[in-house]
Image (tube, grey):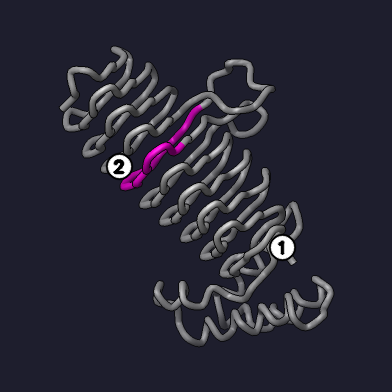
Amino acid sequence: MIHPTAIVDPDARLADDVEVGPFTVIGPGVEIAGGTTIGPHVTLRGPTRIGRDNRIFQYASVGEEPQDKKFGGEETRLEIGDRNTIREFVTLNRGTSQDRGVTSLGNDNWIMAYVHVAHDCVIGDRTVFANGSSLAGHVIVEDDVILGGFSLVHQFCHIGTHAFSAMGTTIKQDVPPFVTVAGNPAEPHGINVEGLRRQGFDAADIQALRRAYRSLYKAGLRLEQAVASMQEMAGAHPPVAELLRFIAGTQRGLVR
């Protein structure tokens, strides 16, 4: 299953059914679980752990040192879950000791060509990062987020579940769950209604999120006033409660 031109370090650990394409280089400290396919001309550096049934396409660079001048060669990691698609020329860097020391990618993510994920990022499940989108260091992206092509995310930003960014968006502050953003800098453009419908969200919950969005962005309220308005809906509508949870934890302030 390993092409004769591939170079696999003796200290790498690959399941028996892992496929490795021509001219790929796999270094020490790399672990790859069963069912994963590594294309040609891929470079994998460790410590990196890759789960089951992933597909990594040609010319991807996975587990390389972080692009951080403070990095001094300390042992940090990249962890990748199961069933991810990682397309051409994607770069996924390991963590740094200035943070948790780990960059992590969950399950069932679709990472398109030329995407960059910097050190210490935490990415959930079922995300879609379109071509050329980039995350600076220490970014958190929750489940089911979609980043349009060439979206740029500033370091330490947090993007909530089911958020959506349009093509070419520059994100410098936290994006609340369920919200669509666009522009440079990013501005809110409503609830991600179509995405929520496709995910099977209840119509009443979507309507409640629309009301919450109006309180947060359209009613001219201060943030604490908007939160008080949304709390009345949170008990009956869990997505609104999720929105409030996110707002309470924001560190960089919200895109507003």
Indicate the secondary structure of the residue bearing disc 1. Answer: loop
Q: Residue at x 48, y 35 (%)?
A: 92
Residue 168: x %, y % from top left: 59, 56
Q: Is residue 13 left or right of residue 72?
A: left
From the viewer's perspective, is 85 left or right of 222? left
The amino acid sitting under disc 1 is Val
Where 18 sits versus 197, above or below? above
Q: Is residue 28 magenta?
A: no
Name the quadrant of the N terminus. Answer: top left
Q: Which residue is mark 2?
A: 54
Number of marks: 2
Read off the magenta span: 77-90
Taking 182 as reference, is 43 above or below it?
A: above
Residue ID for mark 1: 255
Query: x, y percentage for residue 26?
Result: 34, 21
Residue 28 position in % (x across, y down): 37, 16
Q: Is residue 82 left or right of residue 96?
A: left
Residue type at tag 2: Asn
